[in-house]
Amino acid sequence: MSEKRKFAVVTAGASGIGKVVVRELTKSGWHVAFTDVNLEAGEATAIETGAEFHRCDMADSGAIEIVFAGFPTVDLLLNNAGVAGPTLPVMDTPIDAWKNAVDINITSHFVCARAVLPGMIAQRRGVIVNMASVAAKIAYPNRAVYAATKWAVLGFTGSLAHEVGQMGIRVNAILPASVRGERIENVVAEYARANAMDVKAAEAHYLGRQATRAFIEPEEIAATILFLASDAARSITGQFIGVDGGFQ
C-alpha cells in the first residue's frame, strides 16, 4: 500500500510568497489547500496550481475555525497571512489598524495552529511554520504595529515548539527581509511618502542592511519551508530562521 499523500495548508496563498509556496508544494507532490480573502486571485491560483482554494478572512476567527474543520489531518501548516499595517508614529496610529494587524498577523496563527494540532497529535507528526519578519529582531520606528505583531510570532513559535515537541510536532518561524513582490513595493512607497524621500532612496534604505543588497526571491522562502517540512529537518524546532540576505 502506498504512503498517504501529505496534506499542507497555506494561509494567504493566492499571491506573493504564499502563492509561490502553494505552487512549489504541489510540484513536490503535496496535496495543498490554501486560504485567501481575495476570491478572484484565489480562484486563479487554484486553476494555475491545482490546489484547493477556500475563501476566508483571516481576521475572522470563527470563519477560520469553520474552514479548518473541513480539512483532513494536516501534515504541514504555513501561517503566512499578514498585513503590513500603517507607517505611522504610535500616537498617530488608529486603534482599528492595530487591532486588524493583531487579528491577522498573530491571532490567525494561534487559531490555525489550534485547529490543526489535534490531528497532528493523534498521528504524532506534523510541521507548523509561522511567517515572521526581520522586523521581529530590530527597533522599527513608525512601524510599531507591524513589528509588535512579528515579535509576537516569535514568542508564540518558541512556546508552542516546547509544548508539542515530545509529540513529534515541529514549530519554526521564518524571518524574511525584503522579499520581491507587490507588498514590499507598497511598503517602500509608503516609507518614501512618510519620510519625504525618493522611492529609489527608500528602496536603498530597505536593502541597505542586507549584506547582499538584493531582494529575496519568494522561491527562496518556499525552498526553506519545503526543507523544514522534510525529514532532513526532523531535529529543527523552536527556531527563528532568517532568509534575509545577511540582514543586520
Image (tube, rainbow, N blue to C red):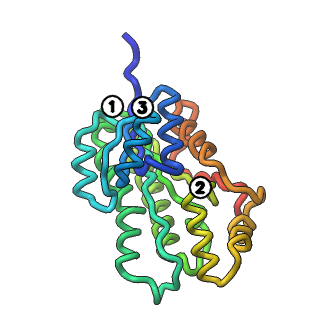
Establish if 27 lies above or below 142.
above
- Residue at the bottom extreme of this rendering: 91
Q: Amino acid at mark 1?
A: Gln
Residue 197, quarter of the rendered image: bottom right
Image coords of residue 210 (percent x, y): 73, 61
Residue 50 circle label:
3
Establish if 221 lies above or below 189.
above
Helix, strand or loop status at disc 3: loop
Report the front residue among 207 and 180. 180
Helix, strand or loop status at disc 2: loop
Residue at numbered disc 1: 123
Task: Tell me which residue sits at (53%, 49%) in the image.
Answer: 17
Residue 212, quarter of the rendered image: bottom right
Image coords of residue 60 (percent x, y): 27, 60
Q: Amino acid at mark 3?
A: Gly
**Disc 2: CA contacts within 10 A as few (<14), some (14-19) or many (>=20):** some
Task: Tell me which residue sits at (28%, 41%) in the image.
Answer: 118
Residue at numbered disc 2: 181
- Quadrant placement of the C terminus: bottom right
Residue 37, quarter of the rendered image: bottom left
For the residues marked 2 and 1, what is the alpha-carbon distance in whole angstroms? 37 Å
Of labels 2 and 3, earlier in sequence is 3
Residue 19 in view of the camera: yes
**Disc 1: CA contacts within 10 A as few (<14), some (14-19) or many (>=20):** some
- Quadrant placement of the N terminus: top left
Establish if 134 lies above or below 235.
below
User: Does the CB distance between marks 1 and 3 fall below 8 Å?
Assistant: no
